[in-house]
Amino acid sequence: MGSASAMKVAVLGGGNMGVNVIEHLRDSPLVREITVFDPDSAKLAKLQHSHGVSTEHELERLLDDVTIPLVFITASNDAHKSLAVRALEAGKAVMCEKPMATNLADAEEMVAVAEKTNGFLQVGFELRYSHLYTRVKQWVDAGLVGRVRNTQCTYCTSAWGRHNVWRAAAGTSGGMFGEKLSHYVDLVRWWVQDEVEEVYAVAAPNVISYYEVHDNYHCTYRFKSGAVSQLTFMMAPAATFQGDPLQNAVSQQAGDGHALRYMLYGDRGAAETDVFLRTLKRWEFGEDAWGQTSKWVENHTWNPDEDFAWFHNTHDQALDIVRRVAMGEPPMTAPRDALETTRLCFAAELSSKEGRPVRLAELGAGVTP
C-alpha cells in the first residue's frame, strides 16, 4: 500500500446497493470512516444504528467536506448524473454504479466533466473483476482461443417484484439494457477489444404487464473485426427465489429456469462460462486428416461461498477503487470506455424501438476498450 493513509469515504444512497458498498468498505485498511448521504432521514437513522456509519442529509455539506476525497454513488439511476457532476466539480473521486445515466447526453456530460476537472470517475462494471470472466480475458489476451469470432450469451432470470418496479420504470431505470444488461454488453467489449460498428435488437411483447421497459431481447453486435456477439435475455420464466435455508441462492436457482451462460469462440479455441452450473471450460482447436479437432483442455469450478467473487465481484472492485484513489492511480475502466458501453446500450434500445439496425456512428465517435 506504500505510504497511503486511511481516508474517509462517502456513500451517496442508503439503499441495498449502498449497504453492500458499506460492507465492502469495512474490509479496506485504507478506509477509516464511512459517511452515508440520503435524503431519507429514517433510512439514515437505521443505517447509523445497524452499520455504525456517520450520516449526512445535506449533500452540499458533504461535498464541501475536504476530508472526504472519494464518493460511491449508489442512488437510483436517475440521480447518477447530477450526483456525479456535483461530486466531480467539488473535487471528489467518484465511483458510480451502472448505468452511468438514464440518457446518453447525461452520460456524455459526466465524462466531459471528469475530463475537464481531471477527476477520477469509474463506473461499476464489476464483471471486469470477477474471477469467472477475468480468466476468460486472460485466455483471450494470451492467444489461447485465437482471434475472437463469435460470442453468445443466454440470460434468463426471474422478475423484479412490484416493490422494486422503479427498475422497470422508463424514467428512473433508463431502460433494461442500462439497468441490467450493460454488464454483459461491457464484458464482451472487454474480451473482444474492438469497436462495435452495428447493433440490431428486437423484443417481443412483454410477459410482465406492469413493466414500462422490455422484459426480453435478442440482440446482435457486429464488431469492426467482423466478430459477432449475440445476447438473448428473458425475464419472467425462472422461478422466484424463495430462500431455501438449506441452499444458497445460486444452488436453489440452478435448473429452475435460470440461466447465465457464455460461449466464446475464437479461431484457435473456445471458452464457456456457466454461473448456475459453476463451471468454466476451455477447448483447443486443431486439425488432422479427418478435419477439425476440438480438445477439452481446462475445467474449473468454485465453492458456493465464492459465488460473488466469481461472477459479481463488487467487493474487490470497491477495494481496488479505494486503493487507486489512495495511490493516485487512474480508474481501472476509463470514463470514455464506460461511455462506449453506455452508447451500445442506448443503440440497442433505439434499434428495438425503431425496428432497424443502428450503426454506432449515429451516436457519436466510439472508443476501443
Image (cartoon, grey):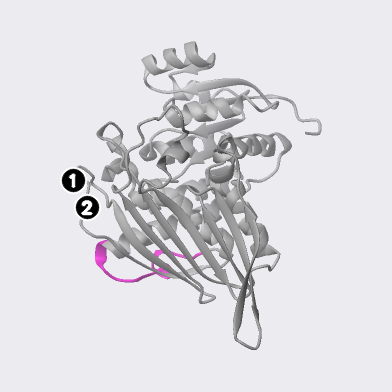
Residue interval drawn in magenta: 353-366
Q: Is residue 367 visible?
A: yes
Q: Is residue 108 visible?
A: no
Observer-nearest of 74 and 141: 141
Q: Position of residue 307 (x, y in %)?
A: 55, 40
- Outermost residue, left direction? 209
Residue at 54% over, 60% down: 272
Q: Position of residue 13 (x, y in %)?
A: 44, 28
Count the labels in the image: 2
Q: Position of residue 257 (x, y in %)?
A: 35, 49
Circle 2: is it few (<14), some (14-19), or many (20+) Cα within 10 Å?
A: some
- 127 relative to 246, above or below: below
187 displayed left or right of 82: right
Q: Quadrant of residue 282?
A: bottom right
Contact? badges 2 and 1 (CB < 8 Å): yes
Observer-nearest of 16 and 312: 312
- Residue receiving disc 1: 209
Label 1 SS: loop
- Outermost residue, right direction? 2
Residue at 61% over, 58% down: 136
Q: Amino acid at mark 1?
A: Ser
